[in-house]
Each structure stands twice: as structure tokens, then as C-alpha cells.
Image (cartoon, rainbow, N blue to C red):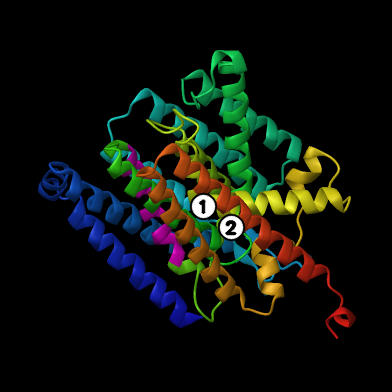
Amino acid sequence: MASGVRIMTLYSILSLAGLAILFVPFVHHAAEARARYYSIYLLLSSFLIAAAVMPALISLGHRIGLVDSPNEKRKTHERATPLTGGIGIYIAFVAIMLLSFHFSVEVKVILVASTVIFLVGLADDIWGISAFFRLLVQVAAALLLVVYGIHVTFVPAFLGGIITETIITMVWIIGITNSMNFIDGMDGLASGSSIIYTLFFSLIAILTKQYYLMFLALAITGSCAGFLPYNFRKGKPALVFLGDSGSTFLGFLLASFAILGEWGKSIIDIVIPVLIMSVLIFDMTLTTVVRILTGEVKTFGQWLHYTGRDHFHHRLADLGITNHQATLLLFGVSIAFGIEALGISFASVLVSVLILLHSILVFTIIGIILVLKKNKKPADVL
């Protein structure tokens, strides 16, 4: 334990030293002059900030009792683990935003709304908050985005226009926000997946010449990367968890970026973020359908607050692979569908539809296999 503390302290000191170099005015201005250098600068800066503050937040979590205790029903960790990782990611992302960005109105709204989501998640980590209240806050935050023009815009007037677009936007934002929270059930899974998603967002933002969106995505990439070494350690338990504050914050940001800028202007455009985050969507869909069919969930509040070992990653672990392997496997799946999303960027409408249908079919087959395997009794195998 003492050696672990020394390593964390050294890691934090090195991160602070790196930050001191990056924030020298000459270095900052030189990086800001060119988009290529500035993207690397933002990535490194957010990474180092998160890495630097994490040891102190881990210590704070233990000191104030903000920890997640083991639970046989859903949680597989063996010791109380701080829930303060999301605070570090939030600090890193907001610090980079304040120090490095000139805000548009849309980005200001996303920052305010995501901060509300973060604070409610933090309150839930500390005191516990009802599912209904959390839902109300998420609805309000999603509506705030819509009011300021951050919503899908591909629905024609004869299909409901802005009303239908508002409904689609709210379902999308609330769904992705909660699905990120749902998938945060194995070390490294939520933060590692967020890194993959934001990297693909950045690549597609480059292809569509949306450099501002690329900078925002990379700021999240770096923030999550600074947290990951403390949470995803081969053969060793996590030192810190995201908590609801971190997972819902990341989910809300990712959902918002998916409809920011030039994305969400057509039905095909929205397929790109759907494919990038298809693992999230599949996990939410699979667990929702199974829980409703089995009668475990009967109301929206139950859906929002229900916990159980029936998620995609849990079902993979039930096949006999380790949690670490299951996480890496899901990373691979996310990368594979991210590549398909890149393909759609160059494809025609027909090819895009075919890729989407192929993806739905693949996930449907995977879901059927996982459900049948989990429900099969030992005697059935003989």
C-alpha cells in the first residue's frame, strides 16, 4: 500500500511538472497558433490535470467516506473504493475549457447543463437521490439544450418538425447519459470507452472540418486518459471509481457532442454517433428489453434505479472470461463500430443504411446468444 502511495505521489508530481511547462505563455501561444499543435496541447493538458489531481481526490474520498462498498448483487470489487474519479475528470475538462477556449453560446449551454448533471450525480454519490428527481434534472438539462438550438434538425414539418426533434433529442440525451452510467460496472470500461468514442468524434470532426468540436472531444479524451491508470490496472483493483457524477457527466457530454455542429442535420448524420456509441445503446436496449420481459422492471423509475449483473459486460464475464478481458473485448467492439462510422462519412445514403442494418443485425445476434447462454441450465449442455 505504501509503495502504491509513493507511485501515485510521483505520478502527481510529474504531471504537475508537465503542466508547468505546458502553461508557460510561450508554449501555450505557440501551440495555439496551429490547430495540429493545439489539439495535442489540449490532449496533454487535460491528461496531466486529471492525473495530477487524482491522488488527492482518492485520499479525499477515503477521508470523508465517499466510497463504494462491495455488494454481492452487482459490485465485484472487494474493498471500499473512492467515488471521486468523476470529480477529477470534471476539474480537468472545465479547467481546459476555461483556460483554452473562446465560448460559443452553444458550448456555454452544454457546459452549464453538464455541470448540473455532474452536481446531481455527485449529490447522489454522497447522499443518494431518488430516480425521479434525477430524471427531472436530466429532462430540464436536455430541454435547456433544445431551447438554445442544440437538437437534431432533420425532421420535416409534416412529421412534427421541432416537436418531434425535441422528443428525439431528449430521448437521445437522457438515454446516452444513463447508459454510460449503466455500463460503468467494470474497471476502466466507462472511461476507456469514452476515450474511444471521443477519439472517433475527433477524427470525424477533422474530416468535416469542425475543428472546434475536435478540440472539445480531445479535452474529454485527455481527462479520461488521466483517470484511467488509477481505475484500470491489470491484476490489481481500481484505486478510484468514476461515481455517478463522472459517468453521467461523460454520458451527457457525449450525447451533446453527437448533435452539436453539423451533426444531427440529417437522418444519416445521426447514424455516425449511433455507431460510435453502439455498445452503450446495445447494452441499454438489451437490459431494458430483458428486464421488462422478465417483469423485473415495470416503471421508468425502476428502470433508472435498477441494478443487476445482467449488462453486456456482465454477460461476457459469465462466459468465463475475466473482467479485464471483457473490458478489452468491449473496447475492440467499440473500435470496430467506430471504424464503420468513419466509413459512413465517405458513403452514399444507400451504403449508410446498409451499414446501419448490418450493425443492428450483428448486435441482435450477439444479444440472442448472450441471453440464451445465460438462461441455459447446466443439464441442457449435456
Highlighted range, magenta: 213-228
Q: In this rendering, does residue 294 appear at all?
A: yes
Q: Residue at x 56, y 13 (%)?
A: 157
Left or right of 37? Residue 336 is: right
Which residue lies most toward the bottom here? Answer: 382
Q: Position of residue 35 (x, y in %)?
A: 19, 44
Mark 1 neighbour density, 10 Å: few (under 14) some (14–19) many (20 or more): many
**Could you tell me which residue is drawn at 63 percent across and 45 percent down?**
178
| Structural crowding at the residue carrying mark 2, measured as other residues with C-alpha within 10 Å and reported as few (<14), some (14–19) or many (≥20) | many
Q: Which mark is residue 83?
A: 2
Q: Quadrant of the C terminus?
A: bottom right
* Residue 367 found in image quarter: bottom right
Q: Are marks 2 and 1 in contact (CB under 8 Å)?
A: yes
Residue occupying image coordinates x 15% and y 47%: 31
Describe the element under mark 1 as helix, strand or loop.
helix
Type of the residue with mark 2: Leu
Say which residue label 1 marks.
Answer: 86
Quarter residue 196 falls in: bottom left
Q: Please identify the dominant SS of the magenta region.
A: helix
Is 120 located above or below residue 224 in the figure?
above
- At x 54%, y 79%, the residue is 236
Residue 255 falls left or right of residue 120: left
The local secondary structure at tag 2 comes to loop
Residue 10 horizontal/vertical position (percent): 34, 72
Residue type highlighted by circle 1 = Gly
